[in-house]
């Protein structure tokens, strides 16, 4: 099927935003737009009566008499140049079932005030609507550090392959393969793989006529509000903003005091996710604390200046200054009005990490407070619960009382090869070698076995898995040595050509516990397990954790059955 132009296609790829705090009327929708931006583009407005819902269209153009690069070019070449710059901008605003949405075209997204955007709208849909095994990109931030991580896998992969620490980071944007047959694009029969990107906005191919667009918006709203996130992606919503206004007030007061002395609070600069695409074009950054104040211009975001200014605000005025202040990005170092790329609330560019007297940790991020200690614990529990499988891929026998690990490994039958303490030497592990696994399963799964009474032994077990996979994937001597070892001890057993393990099973007998669960696995061991699982998934290696029953428990289970 030949690719049609957007004008003839049943869909077009655009970004949709949901606005909050805007009444679902044409008048209110127009009033929420930035007047100065509308004047700048010499905007034309048109009410869209044929949409069947309240709707209005805006179009115009950002015009610059002289492009930002002209001055430098002219100075360098002694050739006076004044090339204009034009960037078209348009949007369609519509109210569907009492909610206001904006579909943007060109630079139309710059017309929407950031304060009205639902900052998790697109992400909320994506975690419910994509194939979790076909994630293509992610943007995540480390709370309190101002660090943004961008991971991309154009061919798609499970979320674990992107290397995100899913319980200590705030995911701001995800891209994956769309998996919602109700949408217009899925019904169009084009047969192509469709990607969807969700952050504050939601980018996907929408229906190109009014009825189809409204239908798509209703589908998106229904999925986002009535369905649970996919199990593999529910960690994205584990971090929520603090809703208790008493706690918010206490945090604001503590930060207001902390900004005077920087005692008990860590403040860092960050880049709002919506600004990432603009950063490469920024040549100057302006900060203004009030409409009547002179703007401070620098070649980058000047956190020291901001903190010094906040320090001398009166008590009780420092937090409001964060929200009232504005950061303006310019495309030219001369920072003229025509060079403005965008303007955002100062609070979006600052993160604060605050410890209260009771030891609880909160982070101001995206101008909202989040409690990350609780999110960390909940995310850790979710990760551990997923890894402890009730339907393991390997069938291991019960552990008889009185056996040690070596005896147990030697007693396992059914095609398992015991490789306990049969180490493989490599240039990096010349003395003792690497213990690749305790058991090699019939399907070549690596099985690591441990009888443990505390976190230390289990942390060593999980680290063993990381070291083994790292050696097999990165050291040819390790791969060759392991193939030889398996052939020698397995009676001529041959591993497939180019063998690299695809699964690791951690098989555990916990002393003093009948079963292995998220509640019985030691907390420090859960941290080590989560780290090991994340590392192994970056190699495309699946991870399972299974509990080994004792012989007594196995007999009871048989009787119950």
Image (spheres, rainbow, N blue to C red):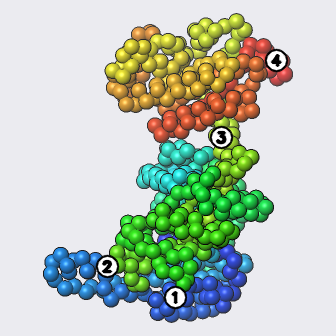
> Where does residue 331 sit, x and y in percent of width and height?
37, 75
Marking on residue 556: 4
Disc 1 element? helix
Element type at marker 3? helix
Name the residue rendered at 76%, 22% in the picture. 513
Which of the image's four quarters has the N terminus?
A: bottom left
**Which badge, 2 or 3, comes first in the chain's sequence?**
2
Q: What is the spatial separation of the Cα atoms under label 2 and label 3, in whole angstroms?
A: 49 Å
| Dot 4 or dot 1, earlier in sequence | 1
In space, the residues marked 4 and 3 are separated at their CA atoms by 31 Å
Query: Relative to 182, is 464 above or below?
Result: above
Question: Is 374 or 192 nearer to us in this picture?
Answer: 374
Where residue 439 is drawn, which disc sits there? none
Compare residues 491 and 509 and report the one nearer the observer: 509
Q: Residues within 10 Å of mark 4 (few under 14, many from 20)?
A: few
Q: Residues within 10 Å of mark 3 (few under 14, many from 20)?
A: many
């Amino acid at each position: 099927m030949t690719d049609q132009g957007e004008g003839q296609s049943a869909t077009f790829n655009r970004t949709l935003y949901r606005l909050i705090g805007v009444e679902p009327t044409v008048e209110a929708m127009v009033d929420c737009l930035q007047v100065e931006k509308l004047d700048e583009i010499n905007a034309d407005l048109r009410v869209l009566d044929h949409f069947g819902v309240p709707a209005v269209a805006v179009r115009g153009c950002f015009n610059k008499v002289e492009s930002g690069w002209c001055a430098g070019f002219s100075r360098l070449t002694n050739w006076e140049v004044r090339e204009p710059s034009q960037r078209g901008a348009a949007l369609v605003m519509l109210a569907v079932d009492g909610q206001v949405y904006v579909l943007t075209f060109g630079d139309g997204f710059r017309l929407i005030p950031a304060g009205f955007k639902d900052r998790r709208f697109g992400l909320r849909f994506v975690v419910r609507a994509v194939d979790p095994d076909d994630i293509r990109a992610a943007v995540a931030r480390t709370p309190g550090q101002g660090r943004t991580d961008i991971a991309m896998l154009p061919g798609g992969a499970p979320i674990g392959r992107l290397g995100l620490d899913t319980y200590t980071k705030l995911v701001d944007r995800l891209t994956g393969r769309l998996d919602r047959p109700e949408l217009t694009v899925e019904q169009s029969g084009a047969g192509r793989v469709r990607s969807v990107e969700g952050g504050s906005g939601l980018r996907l191919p929408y229906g190109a006529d009014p009825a189809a667009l409204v239908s798509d918006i209703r589908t998106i709203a229904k999925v986002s509000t009535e369905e649970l996130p996919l199990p593999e992606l529910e960690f994205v919503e584990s971090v929520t903003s603090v809703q208790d206004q008493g706690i918010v007030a206490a945090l604001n007061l503590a930060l207001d005091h902390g900004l005077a002395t920087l005692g008990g609070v860590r403040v860092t600069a960050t880049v709002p996710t919506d600004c990432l695409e603009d950063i490469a074009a920024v040549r100057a950054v302006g900060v203004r604390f009030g409409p009547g104040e002179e703007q401070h211009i620098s070649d980058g975001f000047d956190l020291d200046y901001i903190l010094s200014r906040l320090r001398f605000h009166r008590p009780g005025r420092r937090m409001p200054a964060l929200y009232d202040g504005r950061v303006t990005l310019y495309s030219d170092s001369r920072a003229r009005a025509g060079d403005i790329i965008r303007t955002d609330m100062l609070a979006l560019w600052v993160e604060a990490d605050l410890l209260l007297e009771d030891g609880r940790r909160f982070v101001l991020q995206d101008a909202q407070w989040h409690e990350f200690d609780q999110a960390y614990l909940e995310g850790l529990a979710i990760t551990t619960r997923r890894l402890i499988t009730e339907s393991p891929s390997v069938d291991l026998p019960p552990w008889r009382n009185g056996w040690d690990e070596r005896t147990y490994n030697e007693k396992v039958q059914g095609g398992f090869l015991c490789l306990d303490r049969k180490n493989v030497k490599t240039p990096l592990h010349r003395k003792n070698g690497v213990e690749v696994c305790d058991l090699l399963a019939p399907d070549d799964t690596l099985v690591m076995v441990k009888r443990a009474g505390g976190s230390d032994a289990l942390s060593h077990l999980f680290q063993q898995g990381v070291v083994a996979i790292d050696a097999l994937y990165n050291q040819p001597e390790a791969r060759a040595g392991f193939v030889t070892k398996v052939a020698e001890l397995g009676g001529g057993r041959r591993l497939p050509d180019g063998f690299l393990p695809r699964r690791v099973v951690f098989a555990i007998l916990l002393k003093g516990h009948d079963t292995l669960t998220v509640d019985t696995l030691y907390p420090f061991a859960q941290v080590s397990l989560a780290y090991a699982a994340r590392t192994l998934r970056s190699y495309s290696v699946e991870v399972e954790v299974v509990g080994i029953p004792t012989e007594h428990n196995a007999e009871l289970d048989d009787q119950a059955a």
